Amino acid sequence: MADSNPAAPPTTRHALEAAGLGKRVPLPSGDLTILDGVGFRIAHGDSVAIVGASGSGKSTLLSLLAGLDTPSSGEVRLDGEPLSTLDEDGRARVRARKVGFVFQSFQLLPSLTALENAMLPLELRGDADARGPAEDTLRKVGLGERLGHYPRQLSGGEQQRVALARAFVTGPSLLFADEPTGNLDTRTGQAIIELLFAMNAEAGTTLVLVTHDEHLASRCGRVLRLDSGRLVSGA
């Protein structure tokens, strides 16, 4: 006799989930709403672009998704783990294990060499060997001859390559890229994007890319569009 109450299928754990996400900032004139009721899910291995006009809430959303900031309402789950239940140190530990970042402004430490910048997330995580993986990853991004150079001795494109190496060296399951070509000329930016997508595909990383560039966004498998703090398409 057939089972009249078959077991429910297992719940899929997504790489990233946002539910009812909101961010408000108190002002003397009243609360300013930056994000309002944003919700979506991103599967493991997906590439997703977040687009919208300046001031639409893109970078705020990325900060909430990465646990760099806390929402006024709603919840973010990173690989099934609710970030809202964690304190700042707990969120930092999750990022160290699972997340890589690439920023528009590179955010390299000027007092550290390219190698030392790439080693830093491994050292902060407590890895016994930081130098070997950092050297290997810098060679992969074409900077094998620049290991001892400081950021001031590198071009913008080279600095962003160091930032890519730093982002991928930990083997993250999720990569956040915030306007990664914003400070680069068109040709250099295109080379960085090709490298980013190639490394992302090789590693099978889930990519969340914030950009105002529609052509760049079209390279991703899915586009989430924000307008005045609300998600208007792509959910």
Image: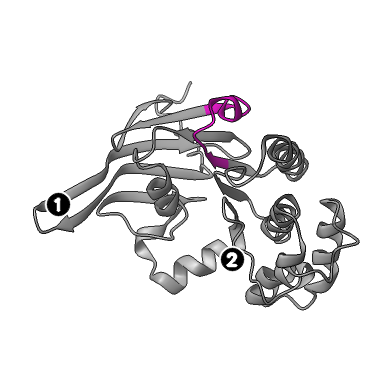
- Dot 1: what SS? strand
Is 105 placed left or right of 230 in the picture?
Answer: right
The residue under label 2 is: 96
Residue in the picture at 71% in, 75% down: 112
Residue in the picture at 71% in, 38% down: 197
> Residue 210 colored magenta?
yes
Disc sitting over residue 90 in the figure: none
* Mark 2–mark 1 distance (CA, rounded to whole Å): 33 Å
> Residue 232 colored magenta?
no
Residue in the picture at 74% in, 45% down: 203
What's drawn in magenta, residue-wise? 208-222
The residue under label 1 is: 31
- Does residue 6 lie above or below 11 as drawn? above
- Identity of the residue furthest to the top in this view: 1
Question: Residue 161, how many percent across, how many down?
Answer: 74, 53
Give, as a three-letter code, the residue at label 1: Asp
Give, as a three-letter code, the residue at label 2: Ala
- Does residue 122 lie above or below 41 as drawn? below
Q: For the residue carrying disc 2, how many other residues have a C-alpha within 10 Å: few (<14), some (14-19), or many (20+)?
A: some
Q: Which image quadrant for residue 133?
A: bottom right
